[in-house]
Amino acid sequence: MAEISVLTPQESGLHAKYLPVPSTVRTAVAGVSGYAGGELARLLLHHPKLADTTPTFLGRPGEDAAKLYLTDLQPQLATSGPSPEVVPFSWDRLVDEGVEVLFLATPHEQSREWVPEAIARNIRVIDLSGAWRLNDDANRAVYKLTDANPDLARNLQAEAVYGCPELHRKDLRDARIVANPGCYATSIILALAPLLEAGIVDLSPGIICDAKSGISGAGKAATAKTHFMYAADNLSAYNVFGHRHTGELLEQLHLDASDIQFTPHLLPIPRGILSTIYVRLIESMHPEKIESIFRACYATSPLVRVRGNGNLPQIQYIVRTNYCDIGFELEPGGKRLVIVSCLDNLLKGAAGQAVQNLNLMCGWNEAEGLL
Amino acid sequence: MAEISVLTPQESGLHAKYLPVPSTVRTAVAGVSGYAGGELARLLLHHPKLADTTPTFLGRPGEDAAKLYLTDLQPQLATSGPSPEVVPFSWDRLVDEGVEVLFLATPHEQSREWVPEAIARNIRVIDLSGAWRLNDDANRAVYKLTDANPDLARNLQAEAVYGCPELHRKDLRDARIVANPGCYATSIILALAPLLEAGIVDLSPGIICDAKSGISGAGKAATAKTHFMYAADNLSAYNVFGHRHTGELLEQLHLDASDIQFTPHLLPIPRGILSTIYVRLIESMHPEKIESIFRACYATSPLVRVRGNGNLPQIQYIVRTNYCDIGFELEPGGKRLVIVSCLDNLLKGAAGQAVQNLNLMCGWNEAEGLL
Amino acid sequence: MAEISVLTPQESGLHAKYLPVPSTVRTAVAGVSGYAGGELARLLLHHPKLADTTPTFLGRPGEDAAKLYLTDLQPQLATSGPSPEVVPFSWDRLVDEGVEVLFLATPHEQSREWVPEAIARNIRVIDLSGAWRLNDDANRAVYKLTDANPDLARNLQAEAVYGCPELHRKDLRDARIVANPGCYATSIILALAPLLEAGIVDLSPGIICDAKSGISGAGKAATAKTHFMYAADNLSAYNVFGHRHTGELLEQLHLDASDIQFTPHLLPIPRGILSTIYVRLIESMHPEKIESIFRACYATSPLVRVRGNGNLPQIQYIVRTNYCDIGFELEPGGKRLVIVSCLDNLLKGAAGQAVQNLNLMCGWNEAEGLL
Amino acid sequence: MAEISVLTPQESGLHAKYLPVPSTVRTAVAGVSGYAGGELARLLLHHPKLADTTPTFLGRPGEDAAKLYLTDLQPQLATSGPSPEVVPFSWDRLVDEGVEVLFLATPHEQSREWVPEAIARNIRVIDLSGAWRLNDDANRAVYKLTDANPDLARNLQAEAVYGCPELHRKDLRDARIVANPGCYATSIILALAPLLEAGIVDLSPGIICDAKSGISGAGKAATAKTHFMYAADNLSAYNVFGHRHTGELLEQLHLDASDIQFTPHLLPIPRGILSTIYVRLIESMHPEKIESIFRACYATSPLVRVRGNGNLPQIQYIVRTNYCDIGFELEPGGKRLVIVSCLDNLLKGAAGQAVQNLNLMCGWNEAEGLL
């Protein structure tokens, strides 16, 4: 792969202000067998801008797969008509079919390897793995990734946009590589960014993020921990002080490791994340002020729903939606603040956010196909 | 194994009426890692008659296992004190320790192989697998078992007692081999045996058994079907016309295949079976008569709870108990009868019934340690 | 109400073949606070033909309700924009707003009372209650309904169309009153109608319908039986020989009470129905023949998905869809048949089917807004 | 009630060191209809020391109840024999029957009223409500209790022992009034007391307690929040900054309100509490030291199970047990500590702890009937 020749973004002609807004776009999804992949397929198949085009659904490279249909992998996507096929992976096929945007719902290692390959073929990528989210090599080390061409990878990493539209909306329009954020990270970043930006948070006691996720976050592999008998009627904390999404919090919120602490828990439900976040304010504030900070920050963000003081979101109202809901409760004293942030880990925490990024990359309404 | 020398039951001195009632007995459990094995360990560790003896918990033969504790395999059995060990399997060890009754919570093939080995060492066996339940070779063929010594196996099979105490109480006292019944089979047999015995069932329309079981019935292996995401919020029928417990129904209820039909379903709950059974009566009857037939049949059966007409059992009242609950509803016309039978598949459907059999083999109160 | 003056259907000018196909229609929903009402609101708010019009959401008559928003009653319907209001019920308002189709997601008694009122105002009605489903007075007696004007009610009842599009598609185009079917009834009728129509069913042993429904079927009222602690990890049979949907089976399938038996069960899941149906065939058949009967019957029904022999549907693949899935397994002998039928009780079993009926009443594609 | 004449503890002859150890004791349970009451009944009916005596199960005062059986209220307690009766409440009956210990599983107001009545009749009380847990009037104000005889109530309050055996074991032997702790409070107090006692906690950043409880904690009343449809597949925070158990934390742990913060959440499971507790240490420590502090503190506490660093408890291993499990994870830096504490809210958090208190009041092994 060392011989990959990659145009710079400038050479590619990707400048946001000159980009035409296409009426549609040719997409492909690699890794359509997983939970996020299935949600992605569903969203793309119902996307108004993609009504006249079916995404290409791909197996793994080198596989000469037996003829496979999308509904073999994702039975819930059946209609009364025929199912789209899932075709063997081939870069030639992607080029021949004129694919413009490739979604990678693939393992971290595969995403790390494929992104340069895609860019070399002038295919824009939205990667749902953790492979391209972290700019700091030390943070990214938890993924144990290797690069065939480290120089190229370094350049592409520098170019990759962290696909949190509420933070990086403008950078997405002409992005070639979008690193779709982690599910936990999205819920925490959206809850904290406005307050940190406003400079009202006292970091000295540390921010505590106690997050809880449904089982789909653990992936489709059948393991002892995803067995119904283990997961049902249970709750467990895991990866205390060591979850891989921590690096995203540090980089996106410009925090040091000592500023924030994040503990994930596994909930006995299929999907949904609720993060309870404990913050101390520098000085005593009125709850209306907190609410106005959130509202100002998300005034033009159709997929974030801000709630008033004491009106906390809960999982059942965001599940199977593309929203992130943010509520809070301020102690009467005005200094201790609890923020509750909820989203569906497969949607706003994965596939929904990926489509939101697609919309922005194309200059469309960012909520197109997501409401 | 062809050289195994096995005493006949008579030579073994096992005659129910002469058997002394022991104050305790040395037991062992092979296969303590599964769900039934875990429940069995729990029941034996709390059994009043076994208070002064700890069962031997065994790994698999030939394994030179690293030191392992029961709570490594069954964390819910932890106390604040030390855990019993799980020791490598060895027939010599069983003999040296003077084990008198061996529980096999092992795969069918292993149980088929080990029972003759145990009998050869004068160890009585309660086998929780399907290996020894079926007398008819054609019925047993679904388990695809092979016998090293077919003649011996045939004799032992003929001697094996189907461990449904409510049907075969007397045969259990001096049994050397007890084939512990299947969970579905127990729920259906206990519901139907009294009515068939009373000769009131019209077999011409066929008996329909629509049974539903919690996920633990599918075993501890992590598979696509035991994944929380597959099982939760779901219900599915499986093995229609082909479930292996059907043979038990035919043999124990003396029915032909055309007389009865059994459809299992997988419920999104950890444990519990509810069987809804549809019977037509030969002639119109009063519900009191139905109830009295059930009550007469189970008058001396402490682990069957009979309910009156229209008072149907449900899973939550039998879960984590050793009872089978039986209720029914008779159509006002008096000829169409719906019976509902509930039990915990791991207890009355497996480990609880195994301990009930142990009690009867020892001449103890059959409910000892089970209420 | 005796003075209500109602045009005959003919006087109303409702003749299917002359009816123009409107580009949109003005709708209202009464009873938007329940589960079916909430799903109905969601479907209507996303319906392509209703994009330029918001349905009128109504409280109860005589209520002078405090200002209420849809999201107060159905928080999961929140967007990042303002919520539609729920307005006090008033016939004048409906007339003033030019409402053409009124959905009633109201209690049976209220629906019985309001349908004549709506017809008198030339408003077509789709009633989700059981009030107008049954033509036989004896069957309808279970609802204990009274009519202010019995003659009028009798005429309207005769005119009402049972809103199962797959059976009565043609009658829906000009229907003024559509009685939306019961959820259990839909799942069973769709499974049996093709086979009964084909004349292949032996009725002598009786058809057994063992049906299981999620908790939403029990309604939104907080009761001992809908308490999480009662419903979770449980399964129970109820209303054996006495469920109100039985009358729909008899009338729509042209059966006698002795031909069919229906036992509902309460599943520990939010939504979804699975009906396991036991049928004996008059003569031995090939499974391909059974499949072809189903396929022929539903060839033009986009919301019924027929599956092949042994390919049984399960709840997770129909939940939150508007489909009814039908699969079956034929015994090798070819005479005993098990049919499994699945649907979402709030969608194809209620709100989805109501919108399907709306589509047909307007001459639109019946799956509009439902895929 | 002002005329109640109450002996002082001294006059009552209750001095721990002179008290004889009874072989059994006469008990009664008022409020046997709730979840904690049901678990209490189960534990008492199986308690070895109470084998020859059945507790008196009571309805509410003034009720002239129709004849009621325990299994009418708690169907899961059925055996194959007759059920104990539930009798109308009457102080005379309690006195006549010689009841020595009365369990109150009653509403707070009722417990506040009845405790003086019981003491006046020389009946010792274990109260499961919140009525007598708080010594500080300001803390107790959240329960809005009134006292008929404030002076007497003040004296009795001063005498009441907070029934956390691990903290107040010695005081329980001769206690007349035991205020059984709150479920959340138990899980948090047992996790924090050893560390606070050891003086290693830095209180300046505040201790954060993020606790999650199963639905049974919300009680048996059918409400919108205990409806299966609301609770299932959901998670929600509630009573942020305002939960009534907070006062117990402050009093038992000798903390100020600013030192600790407690946020409860409602888990979609029947029972179990997991508390995730965030603590900063004064100085960097080794995890072995933390573990040894816990182990030393609970060396003689058979119902607390301490786990090593990184070995966190989870709900499924404590559910339906009388244990509290405590584990922790220390950040490599050695200053940030996460403690996870789990118990069954109905057992160690209510009925199990109540029986533990009974055992200590009688001088029995505190784990009698609880393992």
Image (cartoon, coloured by chain):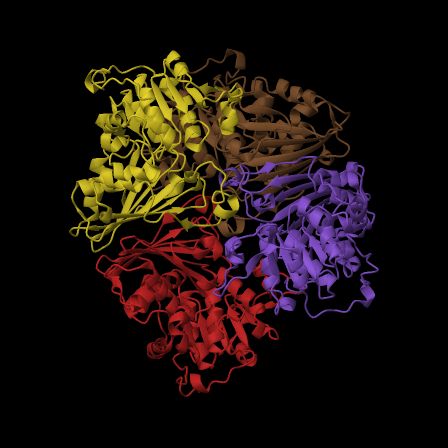
Chain colours: A red, B brown, C purple, D yellow
The image shows residue A95 at horizontal and vertical percentages of 53, 80
The image shows residue C341 at horizontal and vertical percentages of 67, 49
Quadrant, the C terminus of chain C: bottom right
- Is residue C344 shown to the viewer in this render? yes
Vertical placement of B344 versus D65: above or below? below
Describe residue B348's horizontal placement relative to residue A288 as left or right: right
B320 or D76: nearer the eye? D76
B75 or D346: nearer the eye? D346
A336 or A176: nearer the eye? A336
Vertical placement of C359 versus A97: above or below? above
| Quadrant in the rendering for residue C70 | bottom right
The image shows residue A211 at horizontal and vertical percentages of 37, 54
Vertical placement of A287 versus D326: above or below? below
Vertical placement of B82 versus C221: above or below? above
Q: Residue at x 32, y 31 (%)?
A: D180
Q: Residue at x 83, y 60 (%)?
A: C11
The count of marks equals 0
Describe residue D331's horizontal placement relative to residue C119 as left or right: left
- Is residue B28 shown to the viewer in this render? no
Describe residue A133's horizontal placement relative to residue C134 as left or right: left
The image shows residue D181 at horizontal and vertical percentages of 31, 34
Q: Residue furthest front?
A: C3
Describe residue B306's horizontal placement relative to residue B74 as left or right: right
D245 or A26: nearer the eye? D245
